[in-house]
């Protein structure tokens, strides 16, 4: 559930606050490895579904939608999804309240990070986005997680 409770228990009774409030933990950059499991029956060991429950702003480079769709296409080739399911997943992904950032605007810092880490530029786009917004990064990609740690990008955890 995404709504935070506005009630407080006192003296055995529940009292509502006059003004409900929420506590946001800051923006979260979501990569394709997390988004690709949202609309499938794939196991979710990193808690990607919890991202859909957060009140934090979700950010992603526009490249993420392409990468997630490509992951679903691979599932189609393995006969784990059909075309209608992919089309529905794309529709749902684009309907989420994700703030999409043009990947082209992140190429220079991503290229620097790629050179520093010896890691592909398309993954470093996520690191550059997280760094530029002081955001945490949500990824299931272990190599990208290690790169994030090396450059000081905080990692999202479903236990936050």
Image (cartoon, helix red, strand yellow):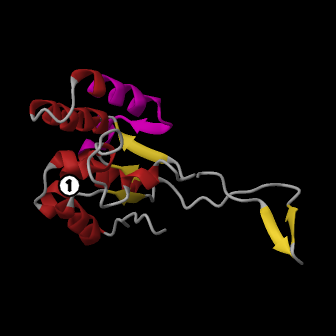
Seen in the picture, residue 5 relative to 58 is either above or below; the reply is: below
86 left or right, relative to 25: left
Stretch of the chain drawn in magenta:
86-107
Q: Please tell me which residue lies in front, 55 or 120.
A: 55
> Which residue does the image show at 31% across and 48% down from the upper left?
31
Q: Is residue 16 on the magenta stretch?
A: no
Pick the residue in front: 59 or 47.
47
Q: Nearer the viewer, residue 31 or 49?
A: 49
* Residue in the picture at 34% in, 38% down: 39
Displayed quadrant of residue 157: bottom left
* Figure check: 101 above or below 11: above
Residue 105, by quadrant, is top left
Q: Main secondary structure of the magenta part?
A: helix
**How many circles with numbers are drawn on the protein?**
1
Q: Position of residue 133 (x, y in %)?
A: 45, 53
Position of residue 18 in the picture relative to residue 84 (left or right): right
Instruction: Assess disc 1: are there few (<14), some (14-19) or many (≥20) residues with their C-alpha within 10 Å of its C-alpha.
Output: some
The residue that mark 1 highlights is: 112
Q: Secondary structure at mark 1?
A: helix
Q: Position of residue 134 (x, y in %)?
A: 45, 59
Provide residue 137's location: percent of width, then percent of height: 36, 58
Locate residue 105 relative to residue 100 in the image: left or right: left
Which residue is rendered at x = 25% and y = 64% of the image?
A: 145
Residue 147 vertical position relative to residue 32 in the rendered view, above or below:
below
Q: Give the percent coordinates (x, y) of residue 56.
A: 54, 53
| Vertical placement of residue 53 versus 92, above or below | below
Name the residue at the bottom extreme.
Answer: 11
């Amino acid at each position: 559930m995404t709504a935070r409770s506005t009630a407080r228990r006192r003296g055995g009774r529940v009292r509502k606050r006059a003004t409900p409030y929420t506590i946001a933990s800051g923006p979260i950059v979501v990569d394709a490895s997390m988004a690709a499991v949202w609309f499938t029956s794939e196991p979710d060991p990193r808690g990607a579904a919890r991202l859909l429950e957060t009140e934090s702003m979700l950010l992603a480079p526009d490249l993420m939608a392409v990468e997630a769709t490509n992951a679903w296409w691979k599932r189609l080739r393995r006969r784990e999804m059909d075309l209608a399911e992919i089309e529905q997943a794309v529709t749902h992904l684009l309907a989420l309240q994700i703030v999409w950032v043009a990947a082209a605007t992140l190429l220079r810092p991503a290229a620097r990070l790629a050179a520093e880490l010896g890691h592909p530029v398309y993954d470093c786009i996520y690191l550059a986005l997280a760094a530029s917004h002081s955001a945490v990064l949500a990824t299931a990609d272990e190599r990208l997680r290690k790169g994030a740690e090396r450059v000081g990008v905080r990692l999202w955890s479903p236990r936050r």
